[in-house]
Amino acid sequence: MLPISETTKVSKAQQKAVHKYVKNNYDRIELTVPKGHKAEIKAHADSQEESVNGFINRAIDETMERDNSALQENTNAHNSESKE
């Protein structure tokens, strides 16, 4: 088996291509959390067999979906009351 340093080497051209792809296809957000919370987030992500980035994206997506559903329910309830 090769040492990690030999199995993970990528050329400068590959690094540049990946950097360009990420720059063109993703937005970056800096996240600040209280001391110690990063380790808790990582442990939770690991327990779900996902990356920290994947976990944070999933948490955001699920929260936005839940919030939008609640907003839609409130709008529908308000519209039903207005018709009476």
Image: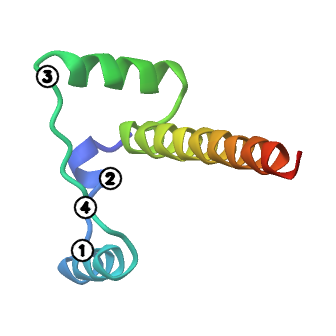
Question: Along the polypeptide, which appears first: circle 2 or circle 1?
Answer: 2
Q: Residue drawn 54% across and 46% down?
A: 64
Q: Residue drawn 54% across and 24% down?
A: 48
Q: Amino acid at mark 2?
A: Thr
| Residue under numbered circle 4 | 9
The answer to whether 17 is drawn above or below residue 59 in the figure is below
List x then y, in percent, for residue 69: 68, 44
| Mark nearer the viewer, 3 or 1 | 3
| Mark nearer the viewer, 3 or 2 | 3
Tag 4 near tag 2, CB within 8 Å: yes
Q: In the drawing, what numbered circle is on residue 15?
A: 1
The answer to whether 26 is drawn above or below residue 76 in the figure is below
Of residues 70 and 53, the one drawn nearer to the viewer in this rendering = 70
Q: Residue drawn 34% across and 83% down?
A: 24
Q: Amino acid at mark 1?
A: Gln
Element under disc 2: helix
Tag 2 near tag 1, CB within 8 Å: no
* Circle 4 residues within 10 Å: few <14, some 14–19, many ≥20: few
| Residue under numbered circle 2 | 7
